[in-house]
Image (spheres, grey):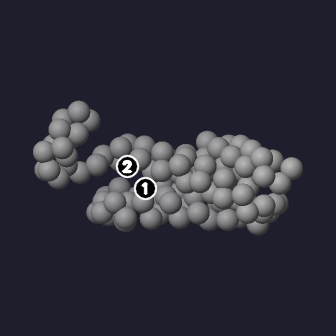
Amino acid sequence: MSSRARDRQRAAGEDAPLSKDELLERVHWAKQGVAVAVGVLMGVVGLQGLPAMIIFAAVCAGTGVAYPRLAGIPDDPSQDISSELLSEGMMPAAGLFFISWILAFNAIHV
């Protein structure tokens, strides 16, 4: 089934299960948003060094684990993708985190 057909089913209120690729894409983009938010927060608070990076890593990993549960996506035992959910989008998210952290920190504290 194509993604457009799934989108039409969802718009009509019908339950169409997410494919593995769609779930990973949603987790990827959720992590990007969380990375920017955490980066700005760490910059505004003025947190520096390793503690800020540890907080980012924990929140970003938690996003990968929590997103399917919060979105109500049932666990599919035939597809064990937990490690993929943790790593999906981590490097781009780290880049966005560092950029937003540095910009927010410099805008307020420097």
Q: How many marks?
A: 2
Instruction: Kindly identify the residue that appears in the image at 53 percent across and 49 percent down.
Output: 33
Q: Which amino acid does label 2 sit on?
A: Leu
The N terminus is located in which quarter? top left
Mark 1–mark 2 CB contact (< 8 Å):
yes
Circle 2 packing at 10 Å, graded few (<14), some (14-19), many (20+), is some
Residue 94 percent across, percent down from the top left: 66, 48
Dot 1 or dot 2: first in sequence order is 2
Position above or below: 68 against 104:
below
- For the residues labelled 1 and 2, the Cα–Cα distance comes to 10 Å
- Pick the residue in front: 108 or 27: 108
Circle 1 packing at 10 Å, graded few (<14), some (14-19), many (20+), is some
Instruction: Kindly identify the residue that appears in the image at 76 percent across and 66 percent down.
Output: 51
- Pick the residue in front: 46 or 62: 46
**Dot 1: what SS?**
loop
Which quadrant of the figure has residue 55?
Answer: bottom right
Is residue 73 at all visible to an observer of this figure? yes
Residue 83 percent across, percent down from the top left: 51, 57
Is residue 102 at all visible to an observer of this figure? no
Q: What residue type is labelled 1?
A: Ile
Work out which residue is located at the far right of the displayed protein and give it: 110
Residue 26 percent across, percent down from the top left: 41, 47
- Pick the residue in front: 109 or 59: 109
Question: Is 2 positioned to the left or the right of 33 in the image?
Answer: left
Which quadrant of the figure has residue 91?
Answer: top right
Looking at the rendered structure, which numbered label has been put on residue 7? Answer: none
Depth check, mark 1 against mark 2: the one in front is 2
Check disc 2 and report the residue beneath it. 23
Which quadrant of the figure has residue 78?
Answer: bottom left
Check disc 1 and report the residue beneath it. 81
